[in-house]
Image: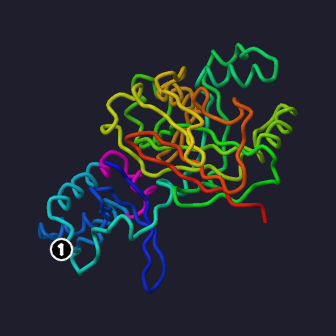
Amino acid sequence: MKLVTFQVYTPVGKFARVGALHNETIIDLNMAYQRMLADRGEAQPSRLATAEVPSSMLELLQGEVSAMNRAREALHYIGGKGPSVYGPDGETIVYDREAVSLQAPVPHPPLLRDFIAFEAHIAATSKKRGQPIPPEWYNAPVYYKGNPLTIIGPEDVLQWPLQTKKLDYELELACVIGRKGRDIPADKAWDYIAGYTIMNDFSARDSQFQEMACRLGPAKGKDFATALGPCLVTPDEIPDLKQISMVARVNGEIWSKGSFGTIYWSFAQMIEHVSRGETVYPGEIFGSGTVGGGCGLEMDRFLQPDDVVELEIQPIGKLKTKILKEN
């Protein structure tokens, strides 16, 4: 499945719903499940659907494997009926893709962790500081905790932050945790991944480096925005992560190209490391860190106001962000 969080406008306000991409449409999974239950003679389809296939992405993820299986069943049921199907009381189930707006797939994750898992990237950034790769990097996957309250989606804009002179993009793949767990071995960790999405870990490099010179951070240099989207692709849609290509464009020009197969620390190893003596929860975001050559810092080339940054990782899609001028 390709899962999305989409926003609909109604006479009583706007609402975010969880859906699945189907051809050129989005199927509301909660409402699809309601229709399926009603067709099967369930007395209270709405109440049961609210519990079993919730209308928000985080709640759906918290339902773990069983909720995902029910969502997939509802998608297949409605997908075979065509776009004219409606809910038990005439509710819209199938939306035209262009009629709704997309938010980040997980708009409010409980936690955001971003790793530095590509050897080529840490080698390049260490070289710029006149240093070798820290030997400790090879001992375990390291990460920082980002700000889950500043997540932006594929149709959001980024206001120029912190009066920075070195605004940078970072080309990353992210996994989303789909099961609660603790002390998870790497060979079991793949079962804890609900899906994958594109991540742009925007960085104000001048602020970031000032902070990290004090042996802490990053903080302000990254906390202003992290982009996710456009969808959350379940693992069955990506049989081999190593074959994934990663591309970054700025104003249509390719700035970066990389392969996820060059990663040193796998998502399974990240999950094993984080869950050692610590519980991970559904909805948490694990960023891969920047692929080698996947940011402007490595090229001494930074973003400017009015730039449009587009990260592409198929089969997930394209994550586009417009940079607005300073106020």
Q: Position of residue 56 (x, y in %)?
A: 43, 62
Q: Is residue 162 above or below residue 261?
A: below
Residue drawn at the location 29% of the way across and 74% of the way down: 92
Magenta part mainly helix, strand or loop?
A: helix
In the rendered image, the residue lying farthest to the front is: 253
Q: Is residue 63 above or below residue 16?
A: above
Q: Is residue 96 left or right of residue 76?
A: right
Viewer-side residue, 309 vs 162: 309
Viewer-side residue, 249 vs 295: 249
Q: Position of residue 307 (x, y in %)?
A: 65, 52
* Magenta extent: 55-68
Indicate whether residue 65 is drawn in magenta: yes
Amino acid type, callout 1 = Ala
In the rendered image, the residue lying farthest to the left is: 40
Residue at numbered disc 1: 43
Image quarter for residue 186?
top left
Indicate whether residue 32 is drawn in magenta: no
Q: Quadrant of the C terminus?
A: bottom right
Residue drawn at the location 82% of the way across and 54% of the way down: 163
Q: Position of residue 305 (x, y in %)?
A: 72, 55
